[in-house]
Amino acid sequence: MLTDTHAHLNAPEFDEDRAETIARAREAGVTRIVNIGFNRETIPTSLQLAEAYDFIWTAVGWHPQDAIDMKPEDLAWIEDLCVHEKVVAIGEIGLDYYWDTSPKDVQDRVFRDQIRLARKVGKPIIIHNRDAHHDVVETLKQEKAAEVGGIMHCFTGSWETAKLCMDMNFMISFGGPVTFKNAKQPKEVLAKVPLDRLLIETDSPYLTPHPFRGKRNESAHVRLVAEAAAELKGMTVEEIAEITTANAIRVLGLK
């Protein structure tokens, strides 16, 4: 009963074997997948994937790396898509100070616009945060993101940052990095996150967990994240799967 709360199965990396990849996820016990559309190209293909499989849902939003390309009509398009029964969140949205592809002021504007849209339509948000912990938290506070809450995707911040996010109604989601031997901080934070705030994900095809690091990631590998979480929490994989699935259903309104 595993749930992968963040995947990009519509990515070109899966063009040769997408159906087989999805079948492997099912065989591994994955009962729900949330696929992410994050720009003009990936939103339509993510929606198509969600429409093709009853156990796949989608989030739609504009990634901070692509913020420079977002036009007002794109925000209106995202708003229109929010009425679709398979669209469960706005995301992934946020700030990325690692890749120098969109100016910080443009990222800030696009992030704020989408938080305001989420509040308008009543959808949770999925947050991308890379090397921007302080600014992400401050923006979420200023834009009253607690009204809708959501998910801190592939969380790599400190326990202090995690607490601030949880205070604003956010789940903390962990992916492949929590399986890495040298990933001290993610392991420490996961161990402290209350069970009712914990989620797991893959970010396929990226961030592949150990022992497949360096190869393409896929949703079936969310089980490896669950195993790492179970070890850190002193629980069984089945218990982690059940708890994180219940959390995903609650925050995203999955069926």
Image (spheres, rainbow, N blue to C red):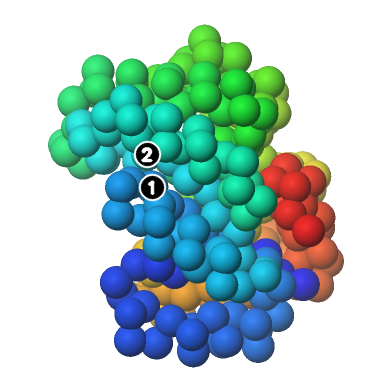
Which disc is residue 62 wearing?
Answer: 2
Tell me how many marks there are: 2
Quarter of the rendering containing residue 125: top right
Q: Quadrant of the N terminus?
A: bottom right
The amino acid on which the numbered mark 1 sits, given as a three-letter code, is Phe
Q: Position of residue 165 (x, y in %)?
A: 61, 28
Residue pictured at 35% horizontal, 34% vertical? 74
Q: Residues within 10 Å of mark 2 (few under 14, many from 20)?
A: many
Residue pictured at 70% horizontal, 80% vertical? 29
Q: Earlier in the sequence, mark 1 or mark 2?
A: 1
Q: What residue would you read off at disc 1? A: 38
Foreground residue among 210 and 129: 129
Q: Is residue 18 above or below residue 72?
A: below
Q: Is residue 218 above or below residue 197?
A: below
Q: Does the residue at mark 1 contact the one at mark 2 (Cβ under 8 Å)?
A: yes
Visible residue check, residue 179: no
Query: Residue 91 vs residue 251: left or right?
Result: left
Residue pictured at 66% horizontal, 21% vertical? 146
Mark 1, secondary structure of its residue: loop
Residue at the top extreme, as displayed: 142
